[in-house]
Amino acid sequence: MGKVTGFLEYERQGPAYRPVPVRLRDWREVYEPQSDAQISEQGARCMDCGIPFCMQGCPLGNRIPTFNDAVYQRDWAHAADQLFRTNNFPEFTGRLCPAPCESACVLGISSDPVTIERIEYEVAEHAFANGLAVGTYPILETGRRVAVVGSGPAGLAAAAQLRSVGHAVSVYERSDAIGGLLRYGIPEFKMEKAVLERRLEVMRDTGIKFHTNVSIGDGGTPLVDLQRNYDAVLLAIGSTIPRLIPVPGAELDGVYAAMVYLEAANRAVRDGVESPISARGRHVIILGGGDTGADCLGTAHRQGASSVTQIEILERPPDSRPDDQPWPTMARLFKTSSAHQEGGERRFSTETLEFHGEDALREISLMDHSAQETFRTPADLVLIAAGFIGPELDRMGLNTPSCMTERGTLRVDNAWRVAAVPGQSPVFACGDAVRGQSLIVWAIAEGRSAAAAIDAHLSGTSVLPAPLEPYALSW
Ligand SMILES: Cc1cc2nc3c(=O)[nH]c(=O)nc-3n(C[C@H](O)[C@H](O)[C@H](O)COP(=O)(O)OP(=O)(O)OC[C@H]3O[C@@H](n4cnc5c(N)ncnc54)[C@H](O)[C@@H]3O)c2cc1C
């Protein structure tokens, strides 16, 4: 522990936000950088508790007190070394993670928790700036070949781990670009795509091969072909079937699943053109009060929406921990994200009844359960951000009871293997396809764990760390 009295001397201080009127005119990330002195002070707030609950809160088991101390000492190289041991992509989680570690920080019992996520961001950025974010190069080639299907954080983490121990890794992605939801889900203002490109460059340099526009199954490359050509196949295909709201009028022009809207917006930003589904001049209603809804909100404001309202069917969450969600759990609390700071209305306890219009959407009927009243409001763009049902298993013929859990996710055994799939080489799975819709940090942890299992299968034993047991076992 660097500074024994740090937590008494310094207040929690996160980064400043860029002013709203300025940031709404561009797509750049919303935070201002912090100085090294500020970050060092924040690291000094870590109490190096005897039992670091933060590490248990993090699915990756990040060595948080150790890198906090290194940051306090401004030993950025040591901090990076510690962080990269457990997290392949701290530059993603440092920007995007809802930080279960901070919910579990012991300082958070009596004060504000340490800004762990932002410290992680700074460590990653220093590492890239100083040439320390190099991939892990294998010291020998095993001659074994692994195909990874899907290039989101789960597939990417698994690929990096498998390559580090000498397997030849090919990543297959059906989209035209690598990254999964990091590419076409998450908007630029949360993470600029240059951050993803920079990481992919590092991964390519270690020898990982990326193949885009290759769909596995469903008229594309059959899964059995991969099984024939590779020693193992890993399915990291995400949870991509959107949950829609089947009320009258749902087929009207102007009603979209959030991901359809966000993908079009991300592509438009990349190409420097107006999105074909632009919110410009429209009254936008977002159905779903979660993070995907907030991403739609920030995007709609940047596109020039006339008004934006975010509707949530559940009650407004409390501002502070309720008794049934005590420390160190990650409590469901009222959150004001950067997108919420930028404007728009939020309504809770409100249910969608009907969409109205001739061909195109004009209005929406809603029921406010707290006021016990129904009302109609103008709407010419509705974005449904109600979550995801599960992975597209039918495309690979895996929608069978032996391959699929009751929740519609891939059924894996205690070695991350979809044991029921016949064929020459074994098929493994990880990420949202196994866990269901989740978080980047869980996807990375699952990718690392599945990689260890695949390596053990190919090599007889593995030195790769496996932070998780397969989740689906409990179902
Ligand atoms: C809009 C949005 C914003 C989010 N923001 C955050 C956030 O800020 N922080 C956070 O922690 N989490 C966030 N999440 C959740 C997070 O992005 C996911 O949990 C994570 O990306 C899951 O990783 P994955 O690798 O399992 O799947 P994905 O990222 O979904 O990647 C799966 C990939 O597999 C490909 N694929 C699917 N089927 C095939 C096939 N048959 N052949 C070839 N390729 C295929 C898909 O095209 C996709 O690229 C967000 C989710 C959404 C929808």
Image: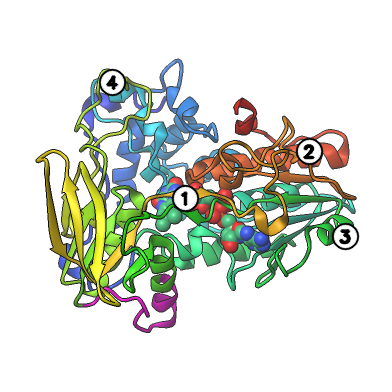
Image: 415 above or below 444: above
Identify the residue under disc 3. Answer: 229
Task: Decide which of 126, 336 is in the foreground and name it.
Answer: 336
Tag in front: 2 or 4:
2
313 lies left or right of 397: left
Mark 4, residues whose alpha carbon is within 10 Å: few (<14), some, or many (≥20)? Answer: few
Q: Position of residue 249 (x, y in %)?
A: 31, 64
Q: Secondary structure at mark 1?
A: strand
Report if residue 345 is visible in the image. Answer: yes
Identify the residue under disc 2. Answer: 419
In the rendered image, the quadrant that contains the C terminus is top right
Give me the disc on residue 109.
Answer: 4
Magenta span: 266-280
Q: Position of residue 283 (x, y in %)?
A: 19, 69
| Chain-order first, disc 2 or disc 4 | 4
Tag in front: 1 or 4:
1
